[in-house]
Image (cartoon, rainbow, N blue to C red):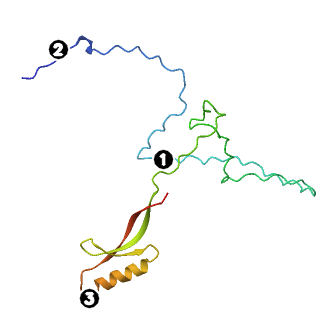
């Protein structure tokens, strides 16, 4: 059983005040559609006013050189934003020395090698990064003669620096 909401008393639209006719005169009326008996007349072309061409002024013999205008591609000079935050506001203590950067912790780095792998993703050989041709050659030798194909893949290993 669906229950309907009781009708509200404010459903009537409010009466709109009568609009006074505008005082503006509409001068451009739409032309009447052409009738079948008479062909439509084309409007006459409008002549455009052309400015008269002025002769070039005579060249001066010793005219001083003018500064070259910047091209459209030239970038405007950057504003001096040194010491300002991202919002363009100076920090509280602008005279304070800059904070020192932290030293790198751990000393852990990665080194890239080329590894030759079989189909079971077992690494068969490892070559230096500069020896990619030798790694490809080794993969070709291991996969030759109908044996299981081998492939070359980049390997990154962790190197710890002695601090």
Label 3 to label 2: alpha-carbon separation: 88 Å
Residue at the image position 54 percent from the left and 25 percent from the top: 25
Tag in front: 3 or 1: 3
Residue 42 percent location from the top left of the image: 53, 48
Residue of label 2: 6
**Front residue of this view, candidates 27 and 60:** 60
**Front residue of this view, candidates 117 and 25:** 117
Query: Earlier along the polypeptide chain: callout 3 or callout 1?
Result: 1
Residue at the image position 38 percent from the left and 69 percent from the top: 154
Q: Secondary structure at mark 3?
A: loop
Residue density around tag 1, few if under 14, some if 14–19, many if 20 or more, within 10 Å: few
Residue 143 percent location from the top left of the image: 28, 83
Residue of label 3: 145
Residue of label 1: 40
Judged from this view, the residue extending furthest toward the top is 9
Q: Secondary structure at mark 2?
A: loop
């Amino acid at each position: 059983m669906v229950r309907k909401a009781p009708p509200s008393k404010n459903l009537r639209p409010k009466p709109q005040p009568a609009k006074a006719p505008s005082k503006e005169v509409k001068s451009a009326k739409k032309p009447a559609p052409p009738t079948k008996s008479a062909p439509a007349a084309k409007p006459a072309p409008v002549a455009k006013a052309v400015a008269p061409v002025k002769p070039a002024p005579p060249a001066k013999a010793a005219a001083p050189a003018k500064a070259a205008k910047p091209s459209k591609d030239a970038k405007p000079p950057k504003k001096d934003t040194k010491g300002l935050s991202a919002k363009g506001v100076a920090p509280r203590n602008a005279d304070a020395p800059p904070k020192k950067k932290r030293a790198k912790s751990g000393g852990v780095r990665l080194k890239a090698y080329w590894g030759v792998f079989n189909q079971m993703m077992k690494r068969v050989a490892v070559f230096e990064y500069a020896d990619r041709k030798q790694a490809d050659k080794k993969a070709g030798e291991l996969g030759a003669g109908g044996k299981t194909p081998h492939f070359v893949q980049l390997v990154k290993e962790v190197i710890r620096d002695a601090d």
